[in-house]
Image: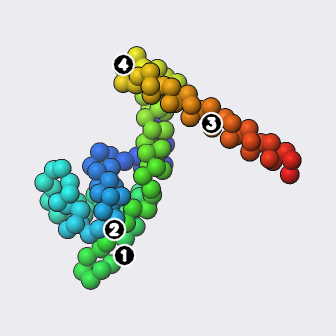
Amino acid sequence: MMGRGKAKSALTPLELEIMQVLWEAGPSTVHEVRPQLKAALAYTTVQTMLNVLLRKGKVSRVQEGRAFRYRAAVNRKRATGSAVEDLVRRMFGGSPEALLMTMVESRQIGKKELERLSEMVAKAEREAGAQRAAREKA
């Protein structure tokens, strides 16, 4: 059974679309967010979704006259990391390797991308080794 905290933090497709608007446009009102969404949604629907994001801690808001201006409370990198972590946990039993193997087998990732990933892993390992060495000296 999924823990409540994890379910609460996951973003639905519409929530993610709203977050993308806030990340791109910066702090915005419901009136400013609404026309940037793919679907023509009612004002009250967008307002409800922003309030859900507020409860989840993904946005904050300040009052401006009669309206609220919403600001992303989490950055795109953190939200992306959480979404990938959730995907790996739910679909691949917590195995990042299984995700990568699926991407390779379904040809969603090619040789050049794998080479780039290998370079990134090697660089991260070098940096981690340098940090360990620095801690040992201290």
Q: Marks 2 and 4, Cα distance to the nearest angstrom? A: 39 Å
Q: Do the residues labelled 1 and 2 touch (CB within 8 Å)?
A: yes
- Circle 2 residue: 27
Secondary structure beneath disc 3?
A: helix
Sooner in the amino-acid sequence: mark 2 or mark 4: 2
- Circle 4 residue: 106
User: For residue 111, which quarter of the picture?
Assistant: top left
Please name which of the two marks, 1 or 2, marks the residue nearer to the observer: 2
Q: Marks 1 and 2, Cα distance to the nearest angstrom? A: 10 Å
Q: Marks 3 and 1, Cα distance to the nearest angstrom? A: 42 Å
Q: How crowded is mark 4: few (under 14 residues within 10 Å), some or many (20 or more)?
A: few
Sooner in the amino-acid sequence: mark 1 or mark 2: 2
Please name which of the two marks, 3 or 1, marks the residue nearer to the observer: 3
Numbered label attached to residue 62: 1
The amino acid pointed to by label 3 is Lys
Q: What residue sits 18% from the left and 50% below the top?
A: 38
Please name which of the two marks, 3 or 4, marks the residue nearer to the observer: 3
- Circle 3 residue: 123
